[in-house]
Image (cartoon, coloured by chain):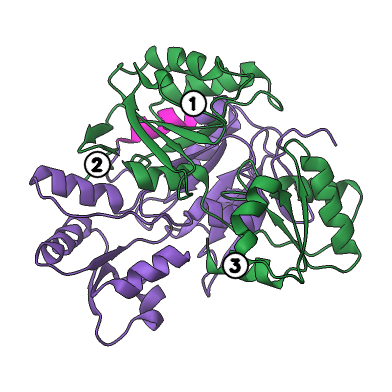
Chain colours: A green, B purple
Amino acid sequence: MTFSAWEAIKKANYIVGYKTYINLIKDMLTDQQKVVSTGMRGEVERCQTAIRLARAGEIVAVISSGDAGVYGMAGLIYQLLFQDNISLQVTVIPGITASIAAASLLGAPLMHDHCSISLSDLLTPWEVITKRIEAAAQADFVIAFYNPRSRERTEHIEKAREILLKYRPPSTPVGIVKNAFRTDQHITVSNLEEFTNCEIDMLSVVIVGNSQSFIKDGKIITPRGYDL
Amino acid sequence: MTFSAWEAIKKANYIVGYKTYINLIKDMLTDQQKVVSTGMRGEVERCQTAIRLARAGEIVAVISSGDAGVYGMAGLIYQLLFQDNISLQVTVIPGITASIAAASLLGAPLMHDHCSISLSDLLTPWEVITKRIEAAAQADFVIAFYNPRSRERTEHIEKAREILLKYRPPSTPVGIVKNAFRTDQHITVSNLEEFTNCEIDMLSVVIVGNSQSFIKDGKIITPRGYDL
């Protein structure tokens, strides 16, 4: 957590967020701070509650895990404000997004050009997602997959693997990090051939190396190209 | 800055880095901490110095701006250690990379699938870079350009713009952020037609929206797709 995020939470009298994320910061909250926590998929309602409270004069902190601007709540807050022509002071505090947290634990896989793709098709057509996987694979981007697998959706990461294998060798390094920097952190280093046999869920990030990435001493490194 | 980065710097007795970045943290250093700062393009030498000091038993903090694992020093440190079979304890502390810092100031442009491309061809062939721009443009990724323009290299961002205009309308939102969260921070909101007339340099990040991105009240938003 950054100093700015800490200060913003301390200053708020309402904390709004998904309950799993509220739990991560509950130790820093005081009895004077009120918490509004909601379940998964309650994103629109959650942001509307935050806006209603802020319009009533409260100082509200909306909590996302990782970075609020990457598949988080920042965009939704702005969209709801614009839709109803509401003028409120909004500050987006940048955070460590999951791919960067994961990369720091895996070694240095994101050292060169890379992209982030969410494998959830709840809000995005699957054809758009596969087109992006295909383009990223072909142009040799390092790829970070967000929302790689859920209970109902187990096959997307398998299809992603199939597309990637058209362009990259089975030995391409793949790293999986679950709950980075949390108590149940889990790090796996594998390869394109085998990684879908490893434990992967909604809280995991999967990072697939580019054609230059390699594994040594359990770390995944993507060279930047320096002459050594 | 995160609490972890602050603690790591406080614990170090040697601070090694590019002098511009050392300057950003000089106020938190004590007289007991020794500083080794080098100029630009001295990356390999700088990392070798850090490794030499650490092998001599010193606690060394190697400073990158943004995140050390994104076009930073983390990968180079690992590569140099592997090359000489040196065993040292390395901890990569994740940080706020420039695209995420810039995005938080521009609104919420990175809310959907996005990629980072460096326009510097010092270490990467220009053909590889253009292939990536082409693929990212075609698959509708939001794109963050790192190292968009230097004194010697002014035409790369123009060529990137030409490629993008093949796939996206001239009205596509473009944000430029220089020195995010530093004293001389500068934020520009423009579009694909006009942005190369704006001030852009090596310390800027340029973010180009996808086909859904829009500008309102001076903010760039990329919708995630929620039903509003």
Is B213 placed left or right of B25 in the picture? right
Other residues around mark 2 within 10 Å, as few (<14) / some (14–19) / many (≥20): few
Outermost bottom residue: B31
Q: Is residue A2 visible?
A: yes
- Disc 3 marks a residue whose amino acid type is Trp
- Disc 1 marks a residue whose amino acid type is Ala
Q: Is residue A163 above or below residue A4?
A: above
Query: For the residue labelled by badge 2, is the local secondary structure a helix, a strand or a loop?
Result: loop
Q: Disc count in the image?
A: 3
**Which chain is disc 3 placed on?**
A
Residue named by callout 2: A225
Q: Position of residue A226 (x, y in %)?
A: 21, 45
**Which chain is disc 1 placed on?**
B
| The quadrant where residue A161 appears | top left
Q: B199 and A58: which one is in front?
A: A58
Is there a contact, CB below 8 Å, between mark 1 and mark 2?
no
Q: Say whether mark 1 and mark 3 are on the same chain.
A: no
Residue named by callout 3: A6
Q: A206 and B132: which one is in front?
A: A206
| The quadrant where residue B6 appears | bottom left
- Disc 2 marks a residue whose amino acid type is Gly
Q: Position of residue A11 (x, y in %)?
A: 70, 72
Q: A227 and B78: which one is in front?
A: B78
Look at 52% across and 30% down and name the residue there: B136
Q: Is residue A168 above or below residue A75?
A: above
